[in-house]
Image (tube, rainbow, N blue to C red):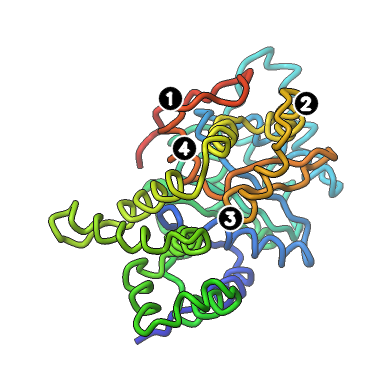
């Protein structure tokens, strides 16, 4: 039987590949894996990463502009010049995928050792400009270009791809190492068979384990175990899906760990579009929410909220810890009043299903 790789071993394996597609459902650690590889590769090559967004049917032109800026930073100006010329001559017409653009991309990447990572592959629309660019890169990129693609799925039209990696659960050793680094978790698993029960119920799924840990640290471990039992009862004692279990624990966190002020803040963050994320804290302070720093600090302590420095800006960017959490919160938006009204509300469009 082939031994399972730890996430660290998988990072080391994939960063030595020229092309990798990491495909898994939500919560298996695709984005974490990409971030680790990106961090390691940044010591060796120029790197650029991009997350595709569901809010746009096709972000091809925006995607190309950002890609051109990355190339220009490293002295490769052909794509930038091409886009400037097209914007001048097209007069509002959209760019199209053609032989000229293929040639420009080929020449721009020729003999250029770099690392590219594109996340959320599943939101690409078939035959959109973005999808055609990424499809071409995955099949025809120059040898020195290292490409990592991550997502819940990839288009079936992308044939003959032998570089697909499907993530599995964490190894027992990884979970033991994780739990042994936290005194609350060490104390919790001292009871005989409890660790084995956690492995069994979570199926070693990274997101489910993380949600379970949040409940343990908030003194609601009993609820987590009861939630697993309820999931099984709801499916007539058949094996419940991981989605059922994740939703059950999210319910527990929302109703048992978080208070109303935290609901309102998280609801606001879940509604934000990217440009708004960098000024949220200042906006909230302007609305005289005096305890905002305490609320954020508590949410950070449970790893439900992340603060990071926004590029080209001294303001901190606020984000939720996982896309599944954002999806869950948006289902509750209609039942809670945001802390302040955003100028742009999220309007989702039905995406193409592969």
Is 196 positioned to the left or the right of 112 in the image? Answer: left
| Contact, mark 2 vs mark 3 (Cβ under 8 Å) | no
Query: Distance of mark 2 from mark 3, alpha carbons?
Result: 46 Å
Looking at the rendered image, the quarter that the N terminus falls into is bottom left
Say which element carries label 3: loop
Q: Does label 2 or label 4 sit earlier along the sequence?
A: 2
Query: How far from the left and from the top, in percent, is residue 27?
Result: 45, 56
Residue placed under numbered mark 2 in the picture: 84
Is 306 positioned to the left or the right of 267 in the image? Answer: right
Say which element carries label 1: helix
Residue placed under numbered mark 1 in the picture: 334
Q: Does label 2 or label 3 sit earlier along the sequence?
A: 2
Q: Residue at x 25, y 61 (%)?
A: 229
Is 119 positioned to the left or the right of 281 in the image? Answer: left
Decide: is 184 above or below 142.
Answer: below
Residue placed under numbered mark 3 in the picture: 302
């Amino acid at each position: 039987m082939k031994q399972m790789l730890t996430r660290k071993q998988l990072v080391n394996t994939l960063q030595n590949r020229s092309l990798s597609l990491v495909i898994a459902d939500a919560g298996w650690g695709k984005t974490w894996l990409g971030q680790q590889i990106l961090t390691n590769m940044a010591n060796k090559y120029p790197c650029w990463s991009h997350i595709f967004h569901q809010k746009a049917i096709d972000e091809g032109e925006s995607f190309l502009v950002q890609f051109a800026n990355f190339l220009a930073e490293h002295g490769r100006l052909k794509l930038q010049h091409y886009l400037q010329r097209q914007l001048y001559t097209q007069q509002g017409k959209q760019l199209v995928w053609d032989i000229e653009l293929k040639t420009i991309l080929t020449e721009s990447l020729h003999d250029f050792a770099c690392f590219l990572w594109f996340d959320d592959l599943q939101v690409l629309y078939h035959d959109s400009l973005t999808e055609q660019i990424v499809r071409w890169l995955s099949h025809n990129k120059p040898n020195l270009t290292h490409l990592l693609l991550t997502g819940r799925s990839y288009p079936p039209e992308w044939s003959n791809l032998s570089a697909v990696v499907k993530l599995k659960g964490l190894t027992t050793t990884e979970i033991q190492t994780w739990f042994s680094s936290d005194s609350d978790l060490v104390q919790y698993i001292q009871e005989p068979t409890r660790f084995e029960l956690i492995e069994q119920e979570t199926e070693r799924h990274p997101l489910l384990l993380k949600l379970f840990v949040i409940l343990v640290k908030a003194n609601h471990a009993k609820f987590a175990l009861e939630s697993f039992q309820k999931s099984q009862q709801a499916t007539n004692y058949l094996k419940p899906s991981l989605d059922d279990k994740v939703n059950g624990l999210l319910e527990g966190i929302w109703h048992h760990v978080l208070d109303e002020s935290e609901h309102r803040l998280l609801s606001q963050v879940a509604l934000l579009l990217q440009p708004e994320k960098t000024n949220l804290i200042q906006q909230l302070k302007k609305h005289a929410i005096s305890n905002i720093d305490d609320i954020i600090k508590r949410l950070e302590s449970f790893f439900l909220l992340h603060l990071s420095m926004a590029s080209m800006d001294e303001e901190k960017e606020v984000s939720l810890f996982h896309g599944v959490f954002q999806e869950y919160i948006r289902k509750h938006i209609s039942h809670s009043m945001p802390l302040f009204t955003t100028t742009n509300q999220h309007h989702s469009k039905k995406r193409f299903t592969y």
